Image: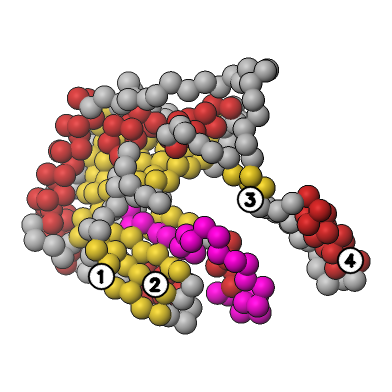
Amino acid sequence: MTAPLSHTEFSEQQAAGYNRIPVARTILADTDTPLSAYAKLAQGPRSFLFESVEGGERWGRYSIIGLPATTWLTVEGHCLSIYSAGDCVDSREVNNPLDEIERYQAQFRSAPAPDLPVFHGGLVGYFGYDTVRYSEPKLLDSCPPDELGLPDIMLLLAEEVLIFDNLRGTLTLVINADANGDDAYGRALARLQEIEEQLPIATASFAPIKLDVEADSAAPSVRHRTQQGEYESWVEQIREYILAGEVMQVVPSQRLSVPLTAAPLSLYRALRNLNPSPYMYFLDLDG
């Protein structure tokens, strides 16, 4: 439906100093859904799906699908590591990981693309709750034990993105081309063609999910990180802090876990059906 920018336009943006140039093509996709498109094209390690429901009644206009990233970064404590094609290409201790991430992001100069939604590529992932300690050093003494061994921060460099327009029934394929690469324009066009050819012939395979729970079915085995007595003592201590004027608001929380045999994407499908929300996301971070 919509052709990508011309080679001349691409060269002009290269000459202007941009090192990431979005090359996009819009196609008709009114027989697909964001979920089926994700399952066909993107399902795999280091991919993502962003969706939304507005007013609790209708789907948001855009859904964003990130194809598996080949570059990503992690932060564990003060160790920042950068990976490319599965190999760690840089790992070092840093004073403030947040500042380093900002510097890493600043190296990318993305060419303007007024015809695309605001987000069409960039860093996608999570900042764990404990990253607050990078900006609030006073909290270092209260660092809880690391029971899961997960990175404090993990960010994917989303360079291949699909934008589903739920209003128009179209799918925009975006390749954020590395303008410094050999034949960057030709490689981007070839990749667009490859993705487009996969869409109609690929078949999304979904395992059946059961949304209703039988009344006599056994309750799942729930593991509480904190016992009831300990949790209640937290609440009492928080009340004392509030009365003493030490704090204004505290959200006591704990982690609950249950065994899961279903595929993670099946769990996401069930959740989006039972409780659609303004911000829904599925990230496969291969961990």
Q: Nearer the viewer, residue 220 or 255?
A: 220
From the viewer's perspective, tell me whether residue 238 is left or right of residue 159: right
Residue 56 part of the magenta-drawn span = no
Which residue in the protein does label 3 denote? 255
Residue type of the residue flagged with mark 3: Arg
Looking at the image, is mark 4 or mark 3 nearer the viewer?
Answer: 3
| Sequence order check, earlier mark of 1 and 4 | 1
Q: CA distance from mark 1 to mark 4?
A: 49 Å
Residue at image mark 1 = 89
Q: Residues within 10 Å of mark 2 (few under 14, many from 20)?
A: many
Q: Which residue is mark 4?
A: 240
Q: Mark 1 touching mark 3, by CB under 8 A?
A: no
Disc 3, SS: loop
Q: Which residues are magenta?
A: 134-158
- Residue positioned 42% across, 34% down in the render: 263
Please name the amino acid that badge 2 sits on: Leu
**Residue shown at 36% from the left, 78% from the top:** 92
Q: Is residue 70 above or below residue 191?
A: below
Q: Are marks 4 and 3 in contact (CB under 8 Å)?
A: no
- First in residue order: circle 1 vs circle 3: 1
Pick whichever, 224 or 67, lies toward us: 224
In the rendered image, the quadrant that contains the N terminus is top left
Q: At 39% across and 72% down in the image, what residue appears?
A: 80
Left or right, 137 with reference to 106: right
- Residue with the mark numbered 2: 80
CB contact under 8 Å: marks 2 and 4: no
Q: Position of residue 170 (x, y in %)?
A: 32, 30
**Mark 2 or 3, which is nearer the eye?**
3
**Quadrant in the picture for residue 275:** top right
| Residue 3, position as x, y percentages in the image | 19, 39
Image point 58% across, 61% down: which residue? 129
